[in-house]
Amino acid sequence: MLVITRYVSLSHSPSLKAANLLRVPNRRHYYSLKPPHKLLKIKPMLNPPSSLSSSFTTNNNNTIRTSSSSTEPIPSASKESAKPSPPQPWLIVGLGNPGKRYNSTRHNVGFEMVDRIAESEGISMSSISFKALFGKGFIGNIPVMLAKPQTFMNVSGESVGAIVAYYKIPLKQVLVIYDDMDLPFAKLRLLPKGGHGGHNGMRSIIDHLKGSRDFPRLRIGIGRPPGKMDAANYVLRPFTKEENKELDFVFQNGSEAVRILLLEGFDKSANYVNSANPLKI
């Protein structure tokens, strides 16, 4: 529909003069007494100013563009600040024989050391997994698994090998704790690797780790059998009351050595535990 607008000069209209509308201030909003000098044509805004644009577009260079000329990089997964990877878990194994008849015997000091670690670190070992009494927890911020194989000493490797394979634990983070007749009673020795030294439990573990000896071990001295006593009988003998008192310090020192090993490294732990006179806590 075509609309034709006519502009008429009203300044000399007697009717308007009579009505005196030009003096009514409220009327100026509704009336234009003079024709416009020029009619304006409003064109659509093809490119609105930046103040009117709130949208963002992405180009092939992975930048965010606004209507202004400035660009800001889009954070990408490859450029994000790398988060530190969580620490890998340790496996701490204590060797011994299951059953009450072997409690507090020399061959079971590995079990007792793991019990002390579990107690001091608040780790429950109430489950049976991989043929072992098994528990998971933390020492500091380091995840750990504690295990006491229930296979009997001479086939301990069946349990240890299964745990290592299932969790893909690096051998440098598998610590085995066991008794050693070649060390004086109550002496501790931390080593980064080594052979079995005639210990059947260690022999079994090495066999099930495909012959690798490259894992740390904490040896607890139980001393040599007196006189001509058979070694097999000696390791199954219980400790005396005096020896048990001394062992309490041994377990405390050993537990502390394990904590240092995980949190501060092998060298500091070895310096602590291998000293001539370990601290008595």
Image: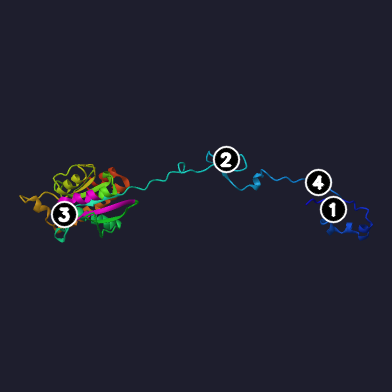
Q: CA distance from mark 3 to mark 1?
A: 109 Å
Amino acid type, label 2: Thr
Mark with earlier residue (4, 3): 4
Q: For mark 4, what is the residue? A: 39
Please give the range of residues in magenta.
Answer: 142-162
User: How many labels sit on residues?
Assistant: 4
Q: Secondary structure at mark 3?
A: loop
Q: Please state which of the two labelled residues, at mark 1 or mark 2, is closer to the viewer.
A: 1
Looking at the rendering, which quadrant does residue 116 occupy? Answer: bottom left
Amino acid beneath label 3 = Phe
Q: CA distance from mark 3 to mark 2?
A: 69 Å
Q: Which is closer to the viewer, label 3 or label 1?
A: 1
Which of the marked residues, 3 or 1, is nearer the chain's N terminus?
1
Identify residue type, mark 4.
Leu
Q: Nearer the viewer, residue 97 or 141?
A: 97
Residue located beneath label 1 in the image: 32
Q: Residue furthest left?
A: 228
Label 3 crowding class (10 Å Cα cut-off): few <14, some 14-19, many 20+?
Answer: some
Q: Are marks 4 and 2 in contact (CB under 8 Å)?
A: no
Q: CA distance from mark 1 to mark 2?
A: 48 Å
Q: Which mark is residue 152?
A: 3
Answer with mark 1 or mark 2, whichever residue precedes in sequence.
Answer: 1
